[in-house]
């Protein structure tokens, strides 16, 4: 009997020990750390405002140089959040440092879930990098040919070559009409192709200097903070967000081009009206405060800067440090507005903010009025006065592509008059610019 009791006691002790182990392991298995979301949902964040603390928002006329002053807090509302096209980075087979854009679908996933290879692999190589730099130097001319390239213009094109249409071609025409001795580089992988050459040929046959070159981000942003940012993006360590990655990279690319080479950047929906020959280190205001008459927002569709200008470096730094792919405009117009607000008045920053009339005589929500013909005598008088105002006070007109892409150019409209004044290949465009 004593043996039976001892065996039962031993079994009870073993059972208790096993239950203790099971309880301990259970607490380990079911202890989890719940991650806290880092960002608001795309639907909410895309409509958030940008708070811009500004020290100076004063404007200068086209005939004066500027130092900006005043102080106020201004909240910028994002009126037009854009739907994100699916964008993909592509590596050139000939040069892994040359990065292009397409709209093939690529969805971002947090790094902890992906077991794929990096999005883009960059293999630094002096020989490969020199391909880009040699093409740029050859085009602009390093010696005697430089005299034929008085103005350096840059555009970026992130879409397919098929979508480079009449509007974009006319923007190029207007550029050369006002600057026949200028040179234009279209930074684009799709345009840097035999089909892209066909687009350029009519200009080349007239002796105008235009070319398309695939971008080399690693070369352009060497020795800047954006170099590491691009490297992390290509490795999949940065969330590109809901806004088109191509659009955001275009915002960065224009900064790198001006910082590396100096010159003039234009969006492909900007119609040039007059020569920029007297402008230096200039950015334009998009809107002004109706009470103070100081600028309330800048835009990056037109920028003119010297090589290695310190404001450009600040723009690049701001992009890399504050990138947000879920808020439209955060890395573009709102970025330049934030930085200019902070640096205005500081020593070493010499630049001019031009009033909206210079490049943005009509804001995005009223651009349709430039495409309409006169309906009656009153409207005809208004159109004539507005046309005269633009012709006398503006250097360029931004067409706000998303809002005006589908509009037709009506007979007698302001845009029709501008087209007739700024064309190189006149009478070659349809009514839908």
Image (cartoon, rainbow, N blue to C red):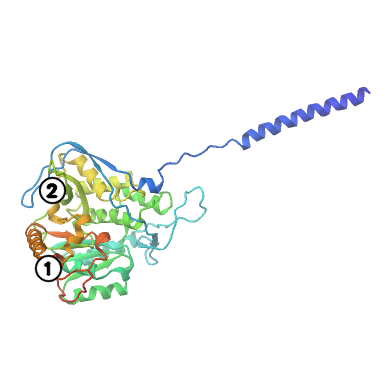
Q: Is residue 433 above or below residue 333?
A: below
The image shows residue 7 at horizontal and vertical percentages of 87, 27
Q: Tag 2 or tag 1, which sits nearer the N-term?
A: 2
Q: Which residue is mark 1?
A: 417
Q: Which residue is mark 2?
A: 352
Q: Is residue 374 above or below residue 358?
A: below
Crowdedness near tag 1: few (<14), some (14–19) or many (≥20) residues, C-alpha within 10 Å? some
Q: Residue at x 26, y 70 (%)?
A: 165
SS for callout 1: helix
Q: CA distance from mark 1 to mark 2?
A: 30 Å
Disc number placed over residue 59 in the picture, else none: none
The residue lying toward the viewer, choosing from 106 and 143, is: 106
The image shows residue 17 at horizontal and vertical percentages of 75, 29
Crowdedness near tag 2: few (<14), some (14–19) or many (≥20) residues, C-alpha within 10 Å? many
SS for callout 2: strand
Count of numbered circles on the image = 2
The residue lying toward the viewer, choosing from 142 and 75, is: 75
The image shows residue 81 at horizontal and vertical percentages of 32, 52
Residue 181 appearing in the image: no
Q: Is residue 404 above or below residue 314?
A: below
Horizontally, residue 275 falls left or right of residue 311, namely left
The residue lying toward the viewer, choosing from 177 and 297, is: 297
């Amino acid at each position: 009997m004593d043996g039976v009791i001892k065996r039962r006691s031993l079994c009870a002790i073993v059972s208790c020990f096993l239950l203790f182990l099971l309880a301990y392991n259970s607490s380990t298995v079911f202890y989890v750390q719940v991650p806290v979301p880092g960002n608001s949902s795309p639907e909410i964040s895309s409509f958030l405002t940008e708070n811009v603390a500004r020290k100076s928002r004063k404007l200068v006329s086209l005939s004066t140089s500027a130092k900006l002053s005043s102080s106020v807090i201004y909240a910028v509302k994002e009126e037009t959040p854009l739907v994100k096209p699916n964008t993909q980075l592509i590596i050139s087979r000939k040069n892994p440092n040359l990065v292009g854009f397409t709209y093939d679908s690529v969805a971002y996933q947090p790094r902890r879930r992906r077991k794929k290879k990096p999005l883009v692999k960059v293999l630094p190589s002096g020989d490969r990098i020199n391909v880009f730099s040699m093409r740029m130097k050859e085009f602009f001319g390093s010696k005697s040919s430089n005299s034929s390239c008085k103005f350096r213009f840059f555009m970026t094109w992130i879409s397919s070559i098929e979508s480079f249409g009449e509007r974009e071609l006319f923007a190029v025409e207007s550029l050369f009409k006002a600057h026949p001795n200028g040179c234009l580089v279209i930074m684009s992988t799709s345009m840097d192709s035999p089909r892209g050459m066909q687009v350029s040929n009519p200009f080349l046959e007239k002796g105008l200097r235009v070319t398309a070159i695939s971008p080399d981000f690693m070369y352009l942003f060497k020795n800047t903070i954006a170099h590491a940012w691009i490297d992390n993006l290509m490795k999949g360590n940065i969330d590109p967000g809901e806004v088109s990655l191509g659009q955001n990279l275009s915002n960065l690319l224009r900064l790198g081009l001006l910082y590396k080479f100096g010159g003039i950047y234009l969006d492909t929906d900007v119609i040039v009206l007059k020569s920029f020959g007297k402008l230096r280190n200039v950015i334009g205001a998009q809107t002004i405060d109706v009470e103070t008459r100081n600028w309330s927002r800048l835009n990056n569709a037109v920028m003119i800067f010297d090589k290695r200008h310190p404001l450009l470096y600040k723009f690049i730094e701001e992009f890399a440090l504050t990138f947000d792919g879920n808020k439209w405009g955060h890395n573009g117009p709102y970025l330049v507005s934030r930085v200019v607000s902070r640096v205005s008045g500081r020593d070493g920053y010499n630049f001019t903010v031009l009033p909206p009339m210079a490049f943005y005589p009509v804001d995005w929500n009223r651009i349709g009025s430039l495409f309409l013909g006169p309906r009656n005598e009153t409207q005809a008088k208004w159109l004539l006065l507005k046309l005269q105002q633009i012709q006398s006070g503006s250097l360029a007109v931004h067409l706000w592509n998303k809002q005006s892409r589908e509009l037709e150019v009506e007979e007698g409209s302001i845009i029709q008059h501008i087209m007739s004044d700024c064309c190189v290949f006149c009478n070659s465009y349809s009514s839908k610019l």
